[in-house]
Image (cartoon, rainbow, N blue to C red):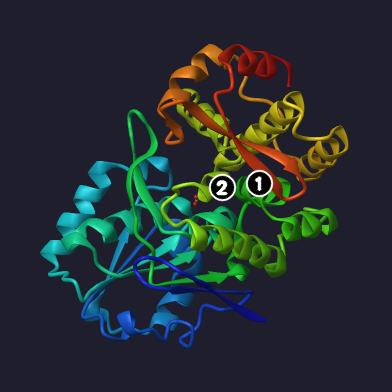
Amino acid sequence: MRETIQISSRYGDYDVIVGRNVLTRKTLHIDCLAKAKKVAIISQKNILELHGEKLLKSLSIPKERLFIRTVQRSEKAKSIETCTRLWQELLKEGFSRDSLIVAFGGGVVGDLAGFVASTLLRGIPWLNIPTTLLAQVDASVGGKTGINVPQGKNLVGAFYPPKRVIVHTAFLDTLSKKELKSGLGEVLKYAIGIDQRVWLKCKRESFKATPSAGLVTACLRAKADVVTKDELEGGLRKILNLGHTLAHAIEGAAPAKMSHGEAVAVGLRYALALAFKHGVASSEYVSEALDLLGKAQLAKRPPSGLTFTKLLPFFAVDKKSEKGGLTWVLPTGPGQCKLVKGLDNNQLAKVYTEF
Ligand code: GLY
């Protein structure tokens, strides 16, 4: 089964092709690849070892036009130093605006390769072929690219969508439990506060096996609906940060203590507690949502010793922080949420110590 989801963007529409076995010559039949004089695959060593042969066979590009570059297997790869290396290496190889970058990996690879594509020669085309659950259900769609700086994650970047996203869910079979859990945090974000279709699918999922192509597709449809309406995060798209305000602060204050998805799961529990406290979520809904998180066996608490005071500086640099305070995304019912501004720090701290 193969589905195509179309996304509208100020750079032109693009397709997300999703299904269990969709990385083929046929789905890679796209103008920017056919015309590309040079193609760079940006990936990681372990991904190429596992799936590189499949990618090369599907791309079927002569060796002299193909360049393969690998980056570190952690958030550390999303640095200005890695960008500088890639910019310089590709320029030395003669990359021009009719060249192409192929991002092949998880969220780190997609964010970094997309940012390099957005900045090299003021923008060259790129394709995204995500291999992790987190990237397949969320990060690969919507055009967010970026790198990290000492002040926080993803604080430098661009909205620059790929020309096509190919979501080959068979890649999920090789993921470790930890990597799957990291993606489940995002899946549950969609279920709990963004889209009822994902909520219903998650109710039926045991989360014991690799998520089905149907569940991945439901998340992608949910994301497509949001980013098509608000590509640049002027309003509606902020809902996709459900669970992320606390998650990003945890990742900033206690780097590498938790995977992104586990931090999102903790952020979702906190958002549910805040929503209940503020009277915008019923106890029945909150307990059903907590059951879903429990079923997926995701983390319940922030890393030990991480006090609210330690998190505060990271809330201040949150991208949703503007005049009038930080915008919180509070879940209100299955697949629904609302944006709330100006929550008081004392209340936030109280719920943090209690949840
Ligand atoms: N991952 C949130 C967004 O794409 O807006």
Q: Position of residue 122 (x, y in %)?
A: 19, 60
Q: Quadrant of the C terminus?
A: top right
Q: Earlier in the sequence, mark 2 or mark 1?
A: 1
Q: Position of residue 82 (x, y in %)?
A: 26, 47
| Residue 298 seen from this side | yes
Residue shown at the point (27%, 80%) measured from the top left: 63
Residue position for label 1:
189
Q: Horizontal placement of 244 versus 8: left or right?
A: right
Cβ at disc 2 under 8 Å from ligand 1? yes
Q: Horizontal placement of 242 versus 68: left or right?
A: right
Find residue 240 and name its label.
2
Q: Tag 1, which secondary structure?
A: helix
Q: Position of residue 270 (x, y in %)?
A: 68, 29
Q: Position of residue 222 (x, y in %)?
A: 62, 60
Asked if marks 2 and 1 touch (Cβ < 8 Å), the reply is yes
Q: Tag 2, which secondary structure?
A: helix
Cβ at disc 1 under 8 Å from ligand 1? no
Dividing the picture into quadrants, the one containing residue 62 is: bottom left
Give the Cα separation between the discs numbered 2 and 1: 8 Å
